C-alpha cells in the first residue's frame, strides 16, 4: 500500500482548492484503452481526479467518455503531448500526482504508410511529458507500451528483461519511447515504470483493428481481409483486464521496472476470423478474402506476465465470453461505429486494401 499512498499525497498548485482531490494526468484518455482506464479510475478510486489530455486525432473519440461528461472529478484538455507549451500549462495549473501515458499512434499498418507521425508522437511526445514530470517531481510516470517491441517470438514467451527487437515503424517508435522513459529514470531520477500489453480487444475500439473491423464488415455482409495465410499468432487481452492491470502496476509496481500485461489467450488470426464468422452468422466460404501479407509481419507474439501476477494482478475475463460480448456490442452500437467507418476510416480502408488483391 505504500506506493498507492504516495499517489494520493498532497496536491500543490493554484487549482488545488478547485479540484479538491489528487490529480492523475491521463494522456490519450479518449482513445480505446485510455477511455476504459479513465472510467475505471473514476469508478473505483473516489479519492482521485482525472485530467484527460487528448489531441482527438482519428482514434480519439469523446463519445467513448460520454457517460462521465460532467463528472465532478473529471476534466478534459484538448491538446497534443508534442505541444510543450500546452503540456507545461497543465502542470502550471496543478501538481500532478501520477501520469499515465496512453497517447500514441498505435496501428502498424498506418505506421508503414506514415512512419514520421509515429516517431513524433511516440518519441517526442513522450519526451515532452517526461520533462514536465521531472520538473514537477511527479510521483509516478507510467508508460503504456506494447508486446510488439519484443518483435517476433518464435518459441517461449517474452520476459521483461529480454532484448527488444522491433520490426515495424510502430514497434520501433514505441521501443524508442520505452528507452527514453528508462533513460530518464536513470539520468534524472524521474519516477518511471512501463507496462507492455498484448493485443487488446473490447468495446469502443477504432474499427481498423482486426476484431472491430471484421465484426463491422460482417454485420454489413462484407468480406474480411485476412493477411497472408492468417496463421499469425497473437495473445488476446480484454480491455477491462488491460486497464485494471495498468492501474494495479501504477499503484503497486516498483519504479524503473517493466511489467508485461498478457491475456494468456493465444490464437491464430484465422481462429479469430472463423469464430467471428460464427458469431455473426456468416459463411467461411464467401466472407474470407486472403490479401497480400503486411510487410515485415511478425509471425508470433507471446508474453510472460508472471511478474505482474506476482503483484497480484491476473486477467478476469474469459476470452470466448469476452469475444461474444464484444461482437454483440458492435451489433448494438452501430451509431458509434458507422460514422467512423463512413468517414476517415473509409479512406484508410481503401488505401490499405484496395490494391492488395487476393493472395
Image (cartoon, grey):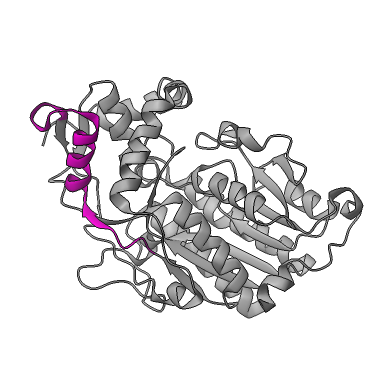
Residue 329 percent across, percent down from the top left: 40, 33
Residue 325 falls in image quadrant: top left
Query: Which image quarter holds the N terminus?
Result: bottom right
Residue 149 percent across, percent down from the top left: 39, 63
Residue drawn at (52%, 58%) of the image = 244
Q: Is residue 109 rendered magenta in the image? A: no
Residue drawn at (72%, 72%) of the image = 5
Residue 44 percent across, percent down from the top left: 63, 55
Q: Magenta: predominant secondary structure element?
A: helix
Residue 166 percent across, percent down from the top left: 35, 62
User: Magenta span covers which residues?
Assistant: 262-287
Residue drawn at (43%, 73%) of the image = 309
Number of numbered discs: 0
Residue 180 is at least partly visible in this image: no
Q: Is residue 286 rendered magenta in the image? A: yes
Q: Residue furthest left?
A: 285
Query: Which image quarter holds the C terminus?
Result: top left
Q: Nearer the viewer, residue 153 or 260?
A: 260
Q: Nearer the viewer, residue 205 or 256?
A: 205
Residue drawn at (39%, 57%) of the image = 171
Q: Is residue 111 left or right of residue 229?
A: right
Residue 218 is at least partly visible in this image: yes
Q: Is residue 200 left or right of residue 273?
A: right
**315 w.r.t. 337: above or below:** below
Residue 301 falls in image quadrant: bottom left
Q: Is residue 53 left or right of residue 151?
A: right
Amino acid at each position: 500500500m505504500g506506493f498507492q499512498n504516495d499517489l494520493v499525497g498532497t496536491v500543490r498548485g493554484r487549482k488545488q482548492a478547485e479540484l479538491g482531490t489528487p490529480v492523475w494526468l491521463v494522456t490519450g484518455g479518449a482513445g480505446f484503452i485510455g477511455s476504459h482506464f479513465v472510467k475505471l479510475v473514476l469508478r473505483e478510486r473516489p479519492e482521485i481526479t482525472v485530467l484527460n489530455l487528448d489531441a482527438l486525432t482519428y482514434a480519439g473519440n469523446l463519445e467513448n467518455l460520454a457517460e462521465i461528461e460532467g463528472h465532478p472529478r473529471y476534466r478534459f484538455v484538448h491538446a497534443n503531448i508534442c505541444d510543450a507549451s500546452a503540456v507545461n500549462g497543465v502542470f502550471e495549473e496543478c501538481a500532478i500526482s501520477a501520469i499515465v501515458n496512453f497517447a500514441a499512434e498505435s496501428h502498424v499498418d498506418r505506421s508503414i504508410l506514415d512512419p514520421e507521425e509515429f516517431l513524433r508522437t511516440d518519441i517526442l511526445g513522450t519526451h515532452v511529458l517526461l520533462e514536465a514530470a521531472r520538473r514537477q517531481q511527479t510521483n509516478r510516470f507510467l508508460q503504456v507500451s506494447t508486446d510488439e517491441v519484443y518483435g517476433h517470438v518464435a518459441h517461449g514467451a517474452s520476459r521483461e528483461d529480454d532484448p527488444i527487437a522491433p520490426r515495424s515503424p510502430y514497434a520501433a517508435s514505441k521501443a524508442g519511447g520505452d528507452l527514453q522513459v528508462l533513460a530518464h529514470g536513470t539520468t534524472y531520477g524521474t519516477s518511471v515504470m512501463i507496462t507492455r500489453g498484448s493485443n487488446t480487444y473490447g468495446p469502443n475500439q477504432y474499427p481498423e483493428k482486426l476484431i472491430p473491423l471484421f465484426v463491422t464488415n460482417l454485420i454489413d455482409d462484407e468480406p474480411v481481409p485476412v493477411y497472408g495465410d492468417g496463421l499469425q499468432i497473437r495473445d488476446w487481452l480484454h480491455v477491462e483486464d488491460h486497464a485494471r492491470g495498468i492501474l494495479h502496476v501504477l499503484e503497486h509496481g516498483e519504479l524503473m521496472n517493466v511489467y508485461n500485461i498478457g491475456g494468456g489467450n493465444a490464437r491464430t488470426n484465422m481462429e479469430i476470423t472463423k469464430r467471428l464468422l460464427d458469431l455473426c452468422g456468416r459463411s467461411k466460404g464467401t466472407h474470407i478474402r486472403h490479401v497480400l501479407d503486411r510487410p515485415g509481419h511478425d509471425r508470433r507474439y507471446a508474453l510472460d506476465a508472471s511478474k505482474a501476477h506476482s503483484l497480484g494482478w491476473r486477467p478476469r475475463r474469459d476470452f470466448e465470453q469476452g469475444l461474444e460480448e464484444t461482437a454483440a456490442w458492435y451489433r448494438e452500437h452501430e451509431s458509434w461505429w458507422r460514422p467512423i467507418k463512413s468517414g476517415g476510416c473509409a479512406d484508410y480502408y481503401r488505401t490499405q486494401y484496395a490494391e492488395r488483391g487476393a493472395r
